[in-house]
Image (cartoon, coloured by chain):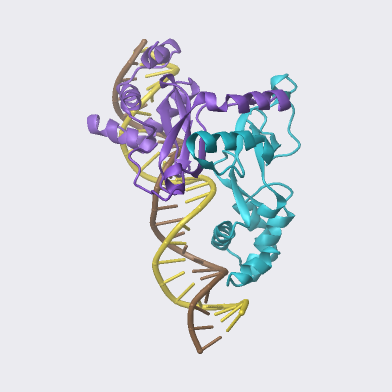
Chain colours: A purple, B cyan, C brown, D yellow
Amino acid sequence: MSCHEILQEKGHRLTLQRMLVIEALHNAVRHISAEEIYEELHRRHPYANISTVYRTLELLKELELVTETDFGEGRVRYHVAEKGHHHHLVCHSCGRVADLEETALHPLKEGLLDEYGFVADLRHLAISGRCNECRSGHETEPKLRY
Amino acid sequence: MSCHEILQEKGHRLTLQRMLVIEALHNAVRHISAEEIYEELHRRHPYANISTVYRTLELLKELELVTETDFGEGRVRYHVAEKGHHHHLVCHSCGRVADLEETALHPLKEGLLDEYGFVADLRHLAISGRCNECRSGHETEPKLRY
DNA sequence: TTAAATGCAAACGCTTTGCAATTGA
DNA sequence: TCAATTGCAAAGCGTTTGCATTTAA
């Protein structure tokens, strides 16, 4: 079921603004910020306001249609949930962000459940550190971020 | 070697304000925010300013005398590094924060190094989820936070 | 003596809010 | 029709900054 259908099914209105926010999220190659979504939205609907973007993202989060990840930039980035869960290795030297399959944290998740009875919400975790390239002294500009 | 000595050794001045910030950090039972440090400081030195707190915390971070943890509150909390590293299990239902020994993440750290060559900086990680008490329906007000 | 540190006030960047006007169902 | 949603402008919040004054060494 598409985001549009889920919104309507739960009794929310399908406005142009919401459709454009959803489209921006789907078109994003990587993780996109509220400001970037607003730029897309504003391009096609110049009267749109950034508070609508925040309100829509809030709604999509509640409906678990998008996930939020904090890459330590002082703002948060969004990703369509259905595109799948994965984690991130954020290099604090070059800023490069690599993906880490969700399964890589399964042992940790199980350990926390067994030993603490804690159900960890590990959907979009950003782990900071130093990447292989920077460690081996081949520091280069990363091609892809977020 | 104490924080005071390390500051001086590295050529930084030992001001009253800095000493009071360090004291507040040491006296804190758990993790303390910049605002809370400022309250302590202001009580004893009414002319002190919060920008001094931020500048001092910045310095202490650089010298690795304090660590910073984001509990997802929209602000960050500080902890004296010498008190030891540990991680946190933050319950999004009741807000309770449990400590997790540093060693619990050693397997993950080693896995990331072996498979990705990534040196993860896992000093004060906050993992969100749902705690045992909330899961089993015995939701109570937590006694201790942060 | 003098560079480092502080206090102050203003600004910053991201996000939220109150409210009147608009709009989807 | 009318509650949900929006645009707008203002404020909120934690944090940072420029600059004149003060101070530790």
User: Can residue A70 be seen?
Assistant: no
What is the quadrant of residue B55 in the picture? bottom right
> Quadrant location of the N terminus of chain B?
bottom right
Residue A113: percent from left, percent from top: 68, 24
Depth order, front residue of A106/A136: A136
Q: Is residue A53 above or below residue B30?
A: above
Image-based side of A92 in relation to B140, left or right? left
**In screen coordinates, is A69 left or right of A122?**
left
Residue B28 shown left or right of residue A94 in the figure: right
- Residue B41 at x, y percent in the picture: 66, 61
Relative height, residue B116 to residue B43 (above, below): above
**Location of the C terminus of chain B (image quadrant):** top right
Q: Residue at x 74, y 55 (%)?
A: B27
Percent x, y for residue B88? 66, 37
Residue A89 in picture, x, y percent from top left: 48, 37
Count all numbered tags in the image, as a single digit.
Answer: 0
Nearer to the camera, A115 or D17: A115
Residue B145 figure quarter: top right
Residue A104 visible somewhere in the drawing? yes
